[in-house]
Amino acid sequence: DQQVKQNSPSLSVQEGRISILNCDYTNSMFDYFLWYKKYPAEGPTFLISISSIKDKNEDGRFTVFLNKSAKHLSLHIVPSQPGDSAVYFCAASEVNYGGSQGNLIFGKGTKLSVKP
Amino acid sequence: NAGVTQTPKFRILKIGQSMTLQCAQDMNHNYMYWYRQDPGMGLKLIYYSVGAGITDKGEVPNGYNVSRSTTEDFPLRLELAAPSQTSVYFCASSQPGQFSGANVLTFGAGSRLTVL
């Protein structure tokens, strides 16, 4: 039973255009959402997060949008660059401190390819 | 800064053998985690620790053991290796409250284990 779902295994975008990666969740107790980026043969690296009290968080070219009523979040990358090609994981937790409720639940990931 | 260091990077085991995956962090984080990632799947939590001497099971703990005798080290022990344990293992650490909002995990580069 997947609590965090990334339904698109892959996405291909032209350099300079917008990349939109989507994530849905089923657990209404989730209050914190994170995006991680992963290059081959490396560990995931933290990209951006958002808490449920916000509907948008921006960091440079990366913006995360949260629609709590729809249990949906998305990551926008503008403009997309070839170096953004990686697997992007969506993750969620109920609380922002450690312990079982603070453990991150991950989606399966979306592989983004940005073509020059 | 080394961050989270995992050894070995690669290992091939025979069915029934045992081994320990090592994980060390130098960020003085209280929380540490072991995840596994199977092809096309997200990261699944095996075990986690909220401090030295305290460990707890995650989503997929069967076939594994952990210990946390120091803040820095969190080894993962595989007893009686089985082909189903073929995976990439990621160790991570966090210090909730370090970033405003979410419990952000810092991951190691991973250990690729094959059981034949």
Image (cartoon, coloured by chain):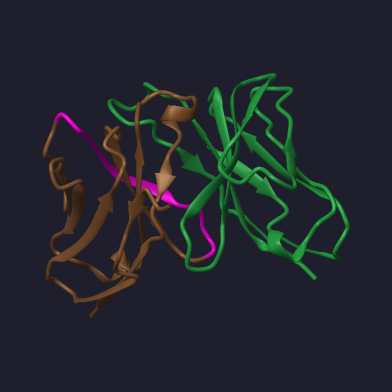
Return the x and y of residue A43 as percentages of the image width and height.
50, 53
Q: Is residue B83 magenta?
A: no
Q: Quadrant of the C terminus of chain B?
A: bottom right
Which one is in front, A31 or A39?
A31
Determine whether, in the image, residue A68 is placed left or right of residue A94. Answer: left
Query: For chain A, what colour was chosen?
Result: brown
* Observer able to see residue B50: yes
* Observer able to see residue B76: no
Return the x and y of residue A9 as percentages of the image width and height.
35, 70
Determine whether, in the image, residue B97 is placed left or right of residue A63. Answer: right
Determine whether, in the image, residue A104 is placed left or right of residue B90. Answer: left
Q: Is residue A53 above or below residue B2?
A: above
* Quarter where residue A111 is shown: bottom left
Determine whether, in the image, residue B76 is placed left or right of residue B89. Answer: right
Label tally: 0
Query: Which residue occupies 53% across, 28% down?
Result: B27
Q: Read off the magenta span.
A: A41-53
Return the x and y of residue B71 as percentages of the image width and height.
64, 23
Query: Which residue occupies 65% across, 28% down?
Result: B72
Query: Which residue occupies 70% across, 59% down?
Result: B85
Q: Is residue A47 magenta?
A: yes
Q: Residue furthest bottom?
A: A116
Query: For chain B, what colour was chosen?
Result: green
Query: Which residue occupies 40% across, 53% down?
Result: A2
Return the x and y of residue A6 as percentages of the image width and height.
31, 60
Q: Is residue B15 above or below residue B58?
A: below
* Quarter where residue A51 is shown: top left
Which one is in front, A71 or B113?
A71
